[in-house]
Image (tube, grey):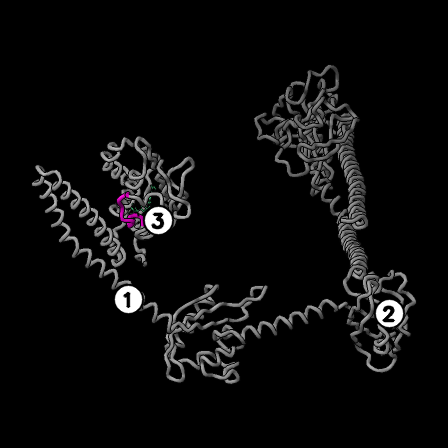
Amino acid sequence: MNKSSRRVLVGGVLLIGTLVASATALMWQDYRQTVQQNLRHLALLAGVTQAYATQVLDANNRLLDRLANDLTTGGPSHTAGLEALMAIRLEGQPFLRGFALLDTQGRVLLSTTASERGGRADLSRLTALPPPDRSMAVRPWVAGLTLTGSASMPEGVGFIPLARPIPLPGSAAAWLVAQLDPGALLPPFADPPEAQILLTLSDGTLLAQAGHLPLGPGVSVTPHPAFARSTPPRGSHGALSLWGDRHVGAWQASAQYPLVSVVEQPHAITLQQWLAAQRGPLLLIGLATVLIGLLTRLSWRHARARERAQQELEAAHEETSRRGQQLALLVKNVQELIFRTNLHGNIRFANARWQAITGESARLARGRYLSDVVLPEHREQVAALFALHGELGVRAAQVSLQSADGQVRVLDISVVPLNSRDGEIHGFAGSAVDVTDLLAAQQQLQAQLTFTELVLECNPLPICLTDTEGRFLTVNQAWEKFMSLPRREVLGRRNVDFLPVHEAQAYEAHTAQLLREGGRVSYEERLHRPDGDVRDVQITKVQLRSSRGESLGILTTKLDITEFRAARDLAEEASRTKSEFVANISHELRTPLQSILGFSELGILRGREHPKLAAMFGDIHAAGKNMLGLVNDLLDIAKIESTVGAFHFERTDLRNLIQDVAEEMQSLLQRKRLTLNMRLGPLPLFAKVDPLRFQQVVRNILSNALKFSPEGASIEITAGLEDASALHIQVRDHGLGIPPAELESVFEAFVQSSQTRDGSGGTGLGLAICRKIIAAHGGRIHAGNAHGGGAVFHIHLPTASYSETLPSPLT
Ligand code: ADP
């Protein structure tokens, strides 16, 4: 929230606060006044009640005095006369129950109530103390209805006795007594609807009450707060705030009589009165609060809107100035020349690019003409750009100028007239781009395209370029000739439109594969040419892509392999025939060789006595054995070459296979006192191999090492993981080694190294067989020379993931 809206809000809240606070203060003041006023009113009521009771007592006392006077002076002397006099006085006094005359023993001498006459009153009930003199201390209130009746009257019934001693002729003293009804003491108006009026004796005995209390006369109300501390002194008065009961009131004590009047009222009445008086102001305050609240809200929203508008304005200013800066920066650094001229083409502003083009500072451009800087032959073109008549839109021209370094640069200039509001041209804005390099690049590209086209055209292979839907974009001459279709007939049409159904299907399938997988697709196909000729072709398809990766089309090359295929088939046939021939011959040779070996062994045995003969048979036997070795090897090669899937691969730990071969060779090793060191590692070396074939390889390598090692030397076999996918086995000896130039040729059939050719007795087929076997396992075998002399043979094999479905090797 911003300053001004916050000020409005705080102001509004303060105003409402002040209003509520002052209204509360005023109302409190008013409330206090209402309470005071009510208390005054109650005090007045208490005073009036007390005065009325005093008056009633005074009046009745005076009446009694008069009667006493009547009775003592000049009244009739006989009883009946006296009683008649009393009855006369009683008349018109509704609150006096009767008059009676008692003697000092309490006997009723005369009474206005006939039934009491002759009866006896209990004087102790009437008087508080024995009379000290003539006067009689009368109890202020006596329970009971009559003077002579018993004291056990129902509660709340009683009278106020008024007594006078009077002298009677012929008798000692007598008492004139009047019985006053306590109800007479309450003023007739004292039946207020809300206030409670109590008239009590000063000791708290209730005499009369007007109100709704369930109390009768004679009951003590001393727990009442008016009597809480002590008997109220005569003539005193006071106010009561009975907050516990929620009552307020006032009391007053009579000066002449032991009477107290108490007036009280529920506090709720005061509150109601006050509230009734407050309704108007409260409504006004409420309205004012709501009004101030609404005004505050309105002003706040207004202030907010103003602030927001202000903020937006500031942001817009900031954005404008930022954009202005960016634009200035852009204009300054843009690679185009940007300029503005007056009506006559006189430059008023040019950006920094001016310097790059003309070689002079951009500040000096002001006041120059563009026609001054271009080559003379282009001045007219430039002048036409700034013509005041003609086209109103953009005008363009391509002109040249000589730059500061002496080179001729080509500029593409665009100029647009600037119109004032009345439509008059008042200047020009323009831009110029240096297109020298672009033009050069275009020319270079054009040359490249021409060259490419030429290469395509001259290529002897039939080549075509199609889009991804198979529509011809271009074909070369060779293609036209091979397909016997002129290019004008095919361009824009689809390749499959010219092909027989099955060729079209194959074509589409390969195109789909290429588009799916990318790269290149190559396959062989038999094509039926329109002239009926059938050709075998190798088709290669490549997807061409732009530098942004978009597909530009598919380049298809056709290579006629009809002759090549025929030659290959022939060669394969010859090779197969050769293998079969070798296999047959080898097989046929083994039978007679076995006989020669058998007979020569017999000859050696028989010729033991004739050493010469035995030696001859020995030679025959050795030669026969060599021959059998050769024949076996030949048969082996023929087998490997001709059998398809004759290998039985198993997942095997190579260490066991190597160890078994080493065991086999123990006696041969010992004969030459050779030591065999094996480092096969602690972990299994699993590979998918044909165990017998693999052992054949190890056996061959190891027996070569053994053969070419000097006596007492050592041979090392090391095996381990080369990486996650390959195993590496090395066999190293300390023999003569193999001349570097022959490291590969020793793997060819019948080839032996120049070092060992003299009489090692081998056939030169062992390593050739090893290479074929290892290749059939998907591996590699090669030879090398170790540091410090000796040959080392390396075998690399894939680890066990190697598949059993490997195709068999071809020669
Ligand atoms: P063979 O041992 O029967 O002649 P091979 O194909 O097994 O046939 O070996 C071909 C030739 O490679 C051998 O004649 C020998 O000249 C050379 N050669 C093979 N192993 C070794 C070796 N460990 N040390 C030196 N020359 C070797």
> Would residue 158 be found to the left or right of residue 27 on screen?
left
Mark 3 vs mark 2, CA separation in Å: 80 Å
Residue sitting at 51 percent across and 79 percent down?
477
Secondary element type, mark 3: helix
Can you say whether 537 is above or below 134 in the image? below
Residue behind mark 1: 573
Q: Residue 87 or 3: which is nearer the viewer?
A: 3
Residue sitting at 23 percent across and 58 percent down?
582
Across and down, in percent, residue 76 comes to 74, 29
Residue sitting at 87 percent across and 82 percent down?
389
Mark 2 vs mark 1, CA separation in Å: 82 Å
Residue type, numbered disc 2: Val
In the image, which disc is placed on residue 373?
A: 2
Residue type, numbered disc 1: Glu
Q: Does residue 106 appear in this view?
A: yes
Mark 1 vs mark 3, CA separation in Å: 27 Å
Dominant SS of magenta comes to loop
**First to last magenta residue range:** 759-767
* Name of the residue lying farthest toward the right: 367
Across and down, in percent, residue 239 comes to 76, 31
Marks 3 and 2, the one that precedes in the sequence: 2
Callout 2 environment at 10 Å: few (<14), some (14 to 19), or many (20+)?
Answer: some
In the image, which disc is placed on residue 746?
A: 3
Q: Is residue 800 magenta?
A: no
The answer to whether the residues at label 2 and label 1 have Cβ atoms under 8 Å apart is: no
The answer to whether the residues at label 3 and label 2 have Cβ atoms under 8 Å apart is: no
Secondary element type, mark 1: helix
Mark 3 CB lies closer than 8 A to ligand 1: yes
Residue type, numbered disc 3: Val
